[in-house]
Image (cartoon, rainbow, N blue to C red):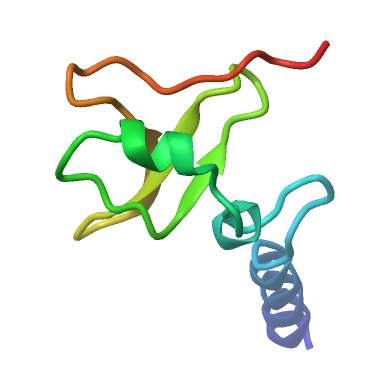
Amino acid sequence: MNKLTMMLGATVVLLAGCEEFEGMSSPNSQVLKNVPEEVLALAGPGQPLDALRKNPVDGCYEYQHVGPVETTFLPLRTANGNPICTAVAS
């Protein structure tokens, strides 16, 4: 009986880690459907432009980088290396 209780408790704890927390969303839900043409024209070479988002904190555009270990968003930059940003609404 004690082993069964421990196994059920461990199962509940492990499954709780799979739950999506409030306020968190998957990276794909943040991807922009319509990116302004000006942003696409400014973007430097070597950056995939199929999954872009705008960071709400600083107003800068980011592209989705799919690496061998993780998928993350990196700043979208011009050919000169400058980030592409907009004004942040207050």
Residue 8 on image: x %, y %: 75, 81
Residue 4 on image: x %, y %: 73, 87
Q: Residue at x 42, y 23 (%)?
A: 84
Q: Residue at x 34, y 38 (%)?
A: 41
- Quadrant housing the C terminus: top right
User: How many numbered marks does the figure carry?
Assistant: 0
Above-or-below relation of 67 to 39: below
Say which quarter of the image contains residue 47.
top left
Asked if residue 6 lies left or right of residue 46, the reply is right
Above-or-below relation of 15 to 56: below
Residue 73 on image: x %, y %: 41, 42
Asked if residue 35 lies left or right of residue 17, the reply is left
- Quadrant housing the N terminus: bottom right
Asked if residue 79 lies left or right of residue 3, the reply is left
Say which quarter of the image contains residue 68.
bottom left
Asked if residue 43 lies left or right of residue 17, the reply is left
Above-or-below relation of 44 to 8: above
Above-or-below relation of 81 to 51: above
Residue 71 on image: x %, y %: 36, 54
Task: Pick whichever, 1 or 51, lies toward us.
Answer: 51
Q: Residue at x 30, y 35 (%)?
A: 43
Say which quarter of the image contains residue 88.
top right
Task: Pick whichever, 19 or 79, lies toward us.
Answer: 79
